[in-house]
Image (tube, rainbow, N blue to C red):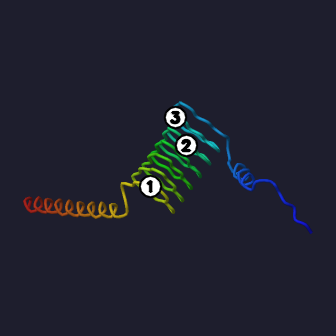
Amino acid sequence: MAEEKSDANPLEEAAANLSEDLEGERIEVKGSNVGTIQGGHVSMTDSAARSVQAQALNMSNAAAGFVQTKSLDMREAAIGFSASEQVTVQSGNIGFLASGRLKAEELCTWLVVAGKVEGNVKATFSPLTALAMGAGFGLVVMLLRGLFSRSRGSEEESRQ
């Protein structure tokens, strides 16, 4: 038996399969401010949104408070909190990021929790700084507890 040769590009088939997986409608937001966006594939350009829930999100010169998506692609954008399976950043800021895979050319963030990180990511809290802050917080709590217990003990003695 002779095998049939196909001239079709295998990437086109993969793209078609991925497009079928996108649930919801395609939404494009340009030059506006909105509250909540929910859709399959959301594209934001020169826009801002309070929250975005989508299968795929593409942001360019945009901002969002909360983002929950499977795939996030951002360029010159800012997000307060993002929970995404896969994130690609050309340039942007994300306050708190939870992701399975992160690929960034330039990203500034406060805290990153990710399975795999590639590229230039500047995080305020590294594991070492988080440990140091936790130890400092614990020390302050112990000192305050000791200070307040002494002041209560001296008040009880003066009453007797």
Crowding near the residue tagged with mark 1, few <14, some 14–19, many ≥20 C-alpha atoms within 10 Å: some
Instruction: Specify the amino acid type for callout 1.
Output: Asn
Find residue 146 and report its horizontal and vertical position in percent: 18, 63
Residue 14 % position (x, y): 72, 55
| Amino acid bearing label 2 | Val
Q: Which of marks 3 and 1 is in front?
A: 1
Badge 2 element: strand
Amino acid type, callout 3: Ser
Q: What residue is rendered at 41% in x and 50% in y?
A: 108
* Whole-percent x, y for residue 86 in the image: 56, 55
**Of pointers 2 and 3, the one earlier in the residue sequence:** 3
Label 3 crowd bin: few (<14), some (14–19), many (20+), radius 10 Å? some
Residue found farthest to the right: 1
Q: Report the quarter where the N terminus lies.
A: bottom right
Image-based side of 107 in relation to 26, left or right: left
Question: Do residues under tags 3 and 1 come within 8 Å of each other at their CB atoms?
Answer: no
**Residue sticking out furthest to the bottom:** 1
Asked if labels 1 and 2 touch by Cβ distance under 8 angstroms, the answer is: no
Q: Name the residue under label 2.
A: 52
The residue wearing badge 1 is 120
**Dot 1: element:** strand
Spatial CA distance of label 3 from label 1 is 25 Å
Residue 25 vertical placement versus 154 (above, below): above
Indicate which disc, 3 or 1, sits on the residue closer to the N terminus.
3
Quadrant in which residue 153 is drawn = bottom left
Residue linked to disc 3: 47
Q: Residue 102 carries which label?
A: none
- In this view, the residue farthest toward the top is 31
- Spatial distance from mark 2 to mark 3, Cα to Cα? 12 Å
Mark 2 and mark 1: span between their CA atoms?
25 Å
Q: Is mark 3 on a helix, strand or loop?
A: loop
